[in-house]
Image (cartoon, rainbow, N blue to C red):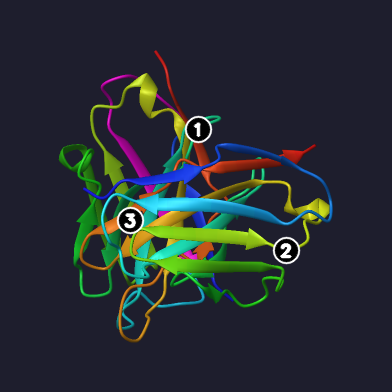
Amino acid sequence: QITLMESGPTLVKPTQTLTLTCTFSGFSLNARGVGVGWVRQPPGKALEWLALIYWNDEKRYSPSLESRLTITKDTSRNQVVLTVTNMDPVDTATYYCAHEPFCIGGSCPLDFWGQGILVTVSS
Amino acid sequence: DIQMTQSPSTLSASVGDRVTITCRASQSISMWLAWYQQKPGRAPKLLIYKASSLESGVPSRFSGSGSGTEFTLTITSLQPDDFATYYCQYYNYNWGVTFGPGTRVDIK
């Protein structure tokens, strides 16, 4: 059974760096083709993809946020960490991590999601 | 960057109605299109992948079609549990992910 859980601060100040951890179970990030991604959703707004990291340490970032994002993995701890620099009130959102399975012949969507963590940016 | 649009943005329907939501990509994305359902306060749930493949455990009243730049999600007989927001998503190993703006389905 695949589960993911986000953790980190729920309140950060403007200009601070946000560090979120996704702790997962039920799969290995050493397995071929597997990935973990981050998606956020401001209150009442649409989903926004942020970043993905794969089993082979390949990374993908949202072009609009790439300069502020870093995604890393710790396979021994079954964790993926996302950092977002220079936080602003517009970054207030629920942040989700999610699992991408291996699919023969191509890409795969995010199939299992964490419950999300609401991060508020305010002084 | 590939942009995704959805129509309508809001849809009012009754239980038993047939509902169709359209998603368009700014350029061809082949069949790399998924559909998600999201209820308030909950994480998105994967319904359809590769444009028309039904995710395990998803009721058969949900179906997807399309390729290239135009895709549809159809719910053949809307159930009370289906009132939610639906998102399309382009996904590609080489380029990442883009979500559509969402379509809210509410009770008429």
* Amino acid type indicated by mark 3: Val
Picture disc at residue B76: 2
For marks 3 and 2 on the same chain, the one whose residue lies earlier in the sequence:
2
Instruction: Give residue B16's position: percent from left, percent from top.
Output: 83, 56
Instruction: Give residue A122's position: percent from left, percent from top.
Output: 42, 17
Q: Nearer the viewer, residue B15 or B43?
A: B15
Give the residue at mark 3.
B97
* Amino acid type indicated by mark 1: Lys
Q: Within 10 angstroms of label 3, few (less than 14), some, or many (20 or more) residues?
A: many
Cα distance between the residues tagged 3 and 1: 17 Å
Q: Main secondary structure of the magenta part?
A: strand
The verdict on residue B65 being magenta is: no
Query: Do the CB atoms of the residues marked 3 and 1 lie less than 8 Å apart?
Result: no
For the magenta stretch, what is the residue range? A10-24
What's the residue at 22%, 60% (across, down)?
B95
What's the residue at 46%, 52% (across, down)?
B23
- SS at mark 3? strand
Of badges 3 and 2, the one in the foreground is 2
Of badges 1 and 2, the one in the foreground is 2
Query: Do the CB atoms of the residues marked 3 and 2 lie less than 8 Å apart?
Result: no
Q: Chain of mark 2?
A: B
Q: Within 10 angstroms of label 1, few (less than 14), some, or many (20 or more) residues?
A: few
- Answer yes or no: is residue B105 visible: yes
Q: Within 10 angstroms of label 2, few (less than 14), some, or many (20 or more) residues?
A: some
Give the residue at mark 1.
A45
Q: Are marks 3 and 1 on the same chain?
A: no
Q: Chain of mark 3?
A: B
Q: Nearer the viewer, residue B61 or A50?
A: B61
Instruction: Give residue B6's position: percent from left, percent from top.
Output: 47, 45
